[in-house]
Structures are given as C-alpha cells and as structure tokens.
Amino acid sequence: TTLRDGEQAVGVALGTDDKVAIARGLDALGVDRIEAGFPRVSPEDAEAMRQIVSAGLAAEIWGFARALRVDVDAVLEVGVRATVIESPVSDRKLSAYGMSRDALCQRVVEAISYAVASGLKVCFFAVDSTRADSVFLEEVIHKAVDAGAGEIAIVDTIGVASPEAAALIVGRARTWLGPELPIHWHGHNDFGLATAAAIASVRAGATWVQGTVNGMGERAGNASLGEVAMALAALYGISTNLRLERRGRG
C-alpha cells in the first residue's frame, strides 16, 4: 500500500511518473499485489492507476474504495479488476461519522454486492478493527463475505495493537472464517509495534500483510515491507515471495 497509504505521509506528494516507477520497483522486488491508489481522490491519482494497469507488471494491481457505489465506479474506470472496499467498524468511528451499525452494514453489503456484480475481486477492509466490538466485528465480516468479499482485512487504524492483541484478533477472525478465506493484517506504527504485530498476525493465521516501503505512511507510518519479510524469513522460517537480496537497491 505504498502508493495509497504510504503517500499519506507528511510531505509526500507523488507524481504520475513517480508512482509508475515505484510500481515497477515493487514488481521487481517480487511484491505480489500493489494497491495502486484511491482513484476518487483526484484525476491525477486515477491517471497514475491507469498507467500502472497498462504497464504490464506481474503483480496484481488493486484499487481502493470506500463503501460507496461512486467509489467502486471510479475503480472500474481505471481498469483494475480487484479492489479494497473500506468501512469503519468501531463504535468510535461510527459515532464520528454519525452512522449507525445497521446503516454501516447496509452500505457495506450494497457496495460489495455491486462491486462483485461488476466483476471485481473484493477485499473488505474493516477500518479500526482493533477497537471494534468483537461481536459486531464478526457480524459485519460475515455480512461482507456473504455479499461476495473473497478476502478480509483486519485493520489497526491507529496503531494500538500489541503483538498479543494482533494475534488474538486475527485468530478470532480465522475461527470465524475457517482455514481457507484469505485474511490480511494492516497495521500502523504509532507505538513502534507495527513489525511485531504483523509477525504475530501471520503466526496467528493471517495470509497477507499490508505494508509500505520503509514503513512510510501517515503519522508514525505503516508496517515496513522489508522488516516484516526479513524477520519472517530469518527468525521464523516463513518465506515470502519478496526478493530480499534486492532490498535497499536502487
């Protein structure tokens, strides 16, 4: 998510050429999926995504959308065939947006159903999962899957999850969803625990870790792709597809 969440770092404003070059670099590193951007943000973001889609990369290119039909349409217009669809799931976030739990569930189901009917692969991105009520989190995740989401992201939006908490929440999600459905972990580094929490999530059953180059991102940043991949390989014997020998090369 370097090209989406990573760009939210203070002082970072990537142009189209920069984004295409970064996408090529990520592809060369062996990154399987690239979240290329949030096309509703600006015409420039949308154009960068079109060029990345057309670049012939081996990586699967994903978009990012809120649980809104107009956002899904924007993803479709740039030519990607897969998207993250986000929605808040904690009561704190819902209160801030003036939204009820029922309204949230309806919005999530409608957006995912529309995206899937339009031919998109969908990962439901449960914003602020780590501060959500566990019973409601399970409910909304099941509704998202029933609507057609093929993958789920557990999201530590403000970086409050300890490694133990990350393992607990991902373990619960794995129990809810069974052994096959892919689960992502998306963490932030506000307490300096992003790498540790990401590793704990993998050991608890996460299939994917969402991260950024050098941990760049808003506030204290995201999980660092290099740190997580190196730690998994060297300390736990868990391999990734990243070409770690290329880490740090220009």
Image (spheres, helix red, strand yellow):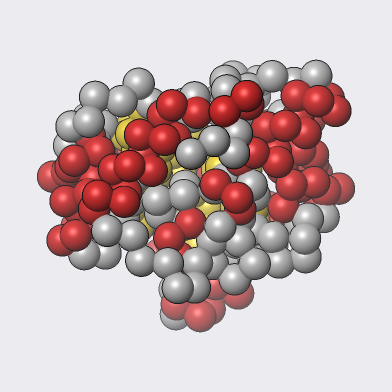
| Quadrant hosting residue 82 | top left
Q: Nearer the viewer, residue 45 or 186?
A: 45
Q: Image height check: is 218 above or below 163?
A: below
The mark tally for this picture is 0
Q: Image height check: is 197 above or below 239?
A: below
| Residue at image point 77% right, 60% down | 192
Q: Image height check: is 93 above or below 33?
A: below
Answer yes or no: is residue 74 visible.
no
Q: Residue furthest front?
A: 250
Q: Nearer the viewer, residue 15 or 228?
A: 15
Query: From the viewer's perspective, is 180 left or right of 168?
Result: left
Query: From the viewer's perspective, is 204 left or right of 68?
Result: right
Query: From the viewer's perspective, is 201 left or right of 29?
Result: right
| Residue at image point 54% right, 48% down | 212
| Quadrant hosting residue 246 | top right
Image x and y of residue 9, in percent: 50, 67
Answer yes or no: is residue 191 visible.
yes
Q: Image height check: is 112 above or below 86?
A: above
Image x and y of residue 94, in percent: 51, 72
Image x and y of residue 157, in percent: 60, 61
| Residue at image point 33% right, 60% down | 14
Image x and y of residue 104, in percent: 43, 61
| Residue at image point 56% right, 42% down | 210
